[in-house]
Amino acid sequence: MLGSPKVLAVAVFVSGAVQVVAENSPQAVQLNMVKVEGQATAGLDELITAEQLENIQAQDLSDIFRNNPQVSVGGPLGLGQKIYLRNIGEDMLNISVDGAEQAGAVFHHSGRVAIEPELLKQVEIEAGAGSATAGAGALGGTIRFTTKDPLDLLNPGEKAGVLLKSGYFSNGSSTKNSATVFAGDEQLSAMASVIAANFNDVKDGNGDEMAGTGSDQNLGYAKLVSRFAQSHKVSLSYEALKESGDILYRPEWKPGPKNPLSDTTAKRDTAIANYTFDSASPLIAFSVNAYQTKSNQKRAIDGFDYEGYIQTTGGRIQNISVIGSHQLVYGIDLRNDQSLLQESQYLSRAGELVTTPEIDEQGRVRGAFLQDIMHVTDDLTVTTGIRYDDYYLKDAAGQKLEDDGYSPNLSANYVLGGGFSVSAGYAQAIRGVTVTDSFKLGSSFNSPALKAEKVDNTELGVEFNGDNLAVAMGAYQAVIKDAIAGDLPWSKEYINHKDDIKTTGFYLNASVTLDKLLLTAALNSADSKQDGEKVSRYVYSSSGVSVGDTLILNADYQLNASLQAGWNMEAVNDVNDIKLDLGGDKIATDKPGYAVHDIYLRWQPLHDTLTLNIAVKNLFDRQYMSHASLEDFSHNAGWENISGLPEAGRELRLSAALRF
């Protein structure tokens, strides 16, 4: 339940902000919740910028979403981090990098998304099922990572440049170095980056070193962009990311007899081509996206190697036409997935050597979508759309599983005047059967009666936008039907659950600018249950989790043109009475609440030629476990090995960037 101190904190923050605003000169305010004025609910909810990531020296997914209470990521090791949006996991989200969908996981004990924050231009978050343009399988929403273009790095009048950067991280005495070269003009530009990092094992808030949390990370990235005939743009990019080291075999679990260190190599290789044509005609704003991404893991345990990969090839063709008061967005998208486990060996319980042959699954999804944004009046915007998805899977057992369906949506936004507006929306989405995690191929199977998952999502919102103050609040409910999972965490058969997974929640965001000071507050409360019991990561893995009511406060102060400082606080309320009945064993746990503070100072003594950054994460060295991590059931007899890892303790981060 929501703790009253948090509600009071938001109330004090907002009321105090209103009083201070009246005493200061007007200045534009931007909320964390970003919406185009008059846009209905089926659209962008939040935008994370490169500057925000640079200020905190973001290193992993947890850092990227640090300031967003609706997105939860836990664990001190990047390979074990999974994304949850309003408690709904990454398996039920549509996640993409420059349009390349990250559609499958190699290993269910690790996350599916690997990204280098330094490459990012922005991150877009669309919470909850919404627009028909969101892509296939977006039951819980959409997250889009966009990387930088060469022109994003070039200053006006420049033709070429070099950016060298070095960083030091005190918790583990780790280092990170990068070099980026960029050149070009409006017609032709290019960039290339190489990044090398050595992260050692980190210590938790109690000062205990956590084995298996270190790794070596290397990245190579190149992008070529061409603009011609004024309205045409083509971009080609290639990214190769590698992480290796003695990492815990199950990166989301704590070390133990069932979770030893494993010689691990994880890779992601992604090639992307994008083309856009913005004609003078309001009927044509045309774009084409094509991509191939391959995620691979090679792991050694008990003297044997296991290697698998997920390969996704896909694309999208889209056009935008403005006809009178209608803005029509329509197109098609497609995706082919392959999950493969290479030939492997292991010792049976009888001590016999067993060889398993190479095995794979192949699936596809074809989609078509239409979204209409109608400006009915100056004050009323209505948006409605529909998408159709057709899923097909030939699984490892040779079964052919097919399903298709339509996903409609309808929402509206009405401007009341005086800065106030109200919005409401309803959307459905489906997600058919997709390829299994590579490391589970051959050891799990699908029910022949398996059908698509579905969600009904409803949202209501109220917003106020003034000269200095912006406030947004709303409520939402998502009901997932026919969720695909096993009966138990170790079940071999995937079935459709008969009980719905229901998430209900609300949010409250506030933002105020006071000359050089920006203050923001964001609160999210989400409750996810199935058959009356709270959802747990241990049971639902990459599909769901229960996170306590989360309040995030931020203060950013621009002292002068070259010096900026900031503070962030995340407070998470406890979640109690998580009860599981697993094969006759009744176990329970609580998730204690916590509050964590971060600070940063960014100084550019030579304009943007030299940038020095100091950040302290977990300022007060708090010992805690993120609510997005695997729950701690270790105090239950017979379940001593089932627990996630605590977060890292205090860390001083230093970086220097030289640009010339």
Image: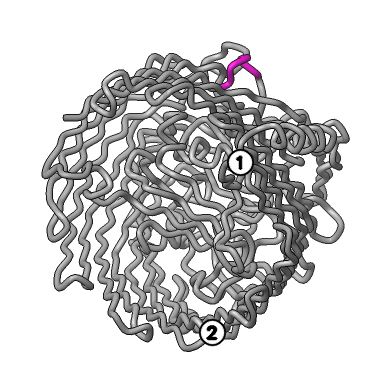
Mark 2 → mark 1, Cα distance in angstroms: 32 Å
Q: Out of 579 and 324, give the one closest to the viewer.
A: 324
Q: Nearer the viewer, residue 158 or 371?
A: 158
Density class for disc 2 (Cα within 10 Å; few <14, some 14-19, many ≥20) is: few
Q: Residues within 10 Å of mark 1 (few under 14, many from 20)?
A: some
Q: Quadrant of residue 57?
A: top left
> Which label sits in the foreground, 2 or 1?
1
User: Which residue in the protein does label 2 denote?
Assistant: 325
> Could you tell whether 417 is left or right of 185 in the image?
right
For the residue marked with disc 2, what is the amino acid? Ser
Residue that appears at 46% across and 73% down? 395
Colour scheme in the image?
one colour
Residue 654's quadrant in the figure? top left
Choose top left, top right, bottom left or bottom right for residue 128.
bottom right
For the N terminus, the quadrant is top right
Where's the C terminus, which quadrant?
top left
Give the vertical position of 184 relative to 456 (above or below).
Answer: above
- Counting residues from the start of the chain, the first of labels 2 and 1 encountered is 1
Residue shown at 32% from the left, 78% from the top: 286
The three-letter amino acid code for the residue at tag 1 is Pro
> Would residue 399 be found to the left or right of residue 353 on screen?
right
Q: Name the disc covering residue 26, or none.
A: 1
Say above or below: 628 vs 107. Answer: above
- Left or right: 486 as drawn, with respect to 325: right
Residue 241 in the magenta stretch? The answer is no
Residue 409 at least partly seen:
yes
Secondary structure mostly taken by the magenta-highlighted segment of the chain:
loop
- The magenta-colored residue range is 618-622
Image coords of residue 483 (percent x, y)? 67, 67
Q: Measuring from the top left, give residue 307's x and y in whole percent.
A: 34, 50
Q: Is residue 501 visible?
A: no
Whether 488 is drawn above or below 631: the answer is below
